[in-house]
Image: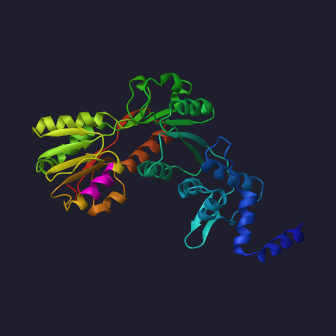
Amino acid sequence: MITNVKNKYKKNIFLSPEKQFSVNIASIFNVDEAAGIPKYRQIINSVCMAIEQGILRKGDKIASINQICGAFSLSRDTVMLAFNELRSRGIVISVPGKGYYIERTDLNFDRQVFLLFDELNVFKEDLYTSFLSQLDNRTNVDIYFHHFNYHVYKQLIGDAAGKYSAYIVMPATFNHSIDVIRQLPPDKVYILDRLKGDLADYPVIYQDFEQDVFDGMMAGKALFSKYQKLIMVFPGGKEPEERVTGFNRFCAALGLAGEIIRSVEKRNIQKGEAYLVVSDRNLVRIVKNAAAMNLQLGKDVGLVSFNDTMLKEVVAGGITTISTDFVQMGHLLSEMVINHKRIRIRNPSKLIVRSSL
């Protein structure tokens, strides 16, 4: 047997790196479009199965993110999500300039967590990464997305019932979902992001969207008062309506002219206006339109966005935001799950002033 193993590795030495990893991908990774399992989860499962079967051992190098993307026509975000979880669980490590290697082959976990988000975006990724960073490598987290589809939401929760030691659910816009959540053990459920009347008996970390907007604008009232008119660009749909209420409260409290519009796509931006935008699409439109009309952000036109990201720190010299702290939300969530806390916590929010206001 020793001779066979040596011969096997000796044979692979003479393969080109590209050939070695094409063999590696084909023998280890399996991503099936029709499997009904998220693709990032199939990548994680493929690595774990290869470890269990002895195909991958501690110290083995695995294919890169780009190679897996190319082999299965996947987005980089999908593969990165899988690799981030594998790293957080201590299964793989990344060596700068060299790649990813198997670090841990013990796949038994003390805690299995079901995490249901509404969608994946930059700030949800910050929340997720923060949450994982506080967990030990004996905890496994399965993350799913319902994309504001109630049927998918109901199906995922139903399929998960009885399989996990903790259930973290982001109900988003869904009201009256108690009958769905009731399928899960009540002492293992944690609600995230929004307060829901029918879910009042469950622990929750939430944003107070109305108060967050009001408090954030009050913190910058001297800056907002410089403008002749305040305009909230609110597309509706999946966005929390409470933000509109908070905006109207602020305008009434300071006696400022305010307006609610759905989009700025066909609007002529005027000097002396300040815009609060929920959608990043409208954010880009205002930045482009202001530049085309030679209007200076923060002087001629004000601009405030919601949900802070690293990109908003540098776009157009810096975009002012009203944002909850998603890193803090991840930390609070991990503490709640690890210590089985049955509490209701409002996540902190603040106005982050940059040159656009």
Instruction: Say above or below: 285 vs 164.
Output: below
Residue located at (70% from left, 67% from top): 21
Residue located at (70% from left, 71% from top): 18
Q: Is residue 84 left or right of residue 172?
A: right
Q: Position of residue 99 (x, y in %)?
A: 60, 68
When asked about the image quadrant of residue 346, the answer is top left
Q: Main secondary structure of the magenta part?
A: helix
Q: Position of residue 334 (x, y in %)?
A: 47, 44
Q: Position of residue 312 (x, y in %)?
A: 33, 57
Q: How many marks?
A: 0
* Residue 52 appears in view: yes
Q: Is residue 29 left or right of residue 202?
A: right
Instruction: Say above or below: 16 vs 48.
Output: below
Front residue of this view, candidates 275 and 220: 275
Quadrant of the frame with the N terminus: bottom right
Asked if residue 145 is among those painted magenta in the image, a careful observer would answer no
Residue located at (64% from left, 52% from top): 44
Quadrant of the frame with the C terminus: bottom left
What span is in magenta?
Answer: 282-289
Quick one: which residue is furthest to the front in this view? 266
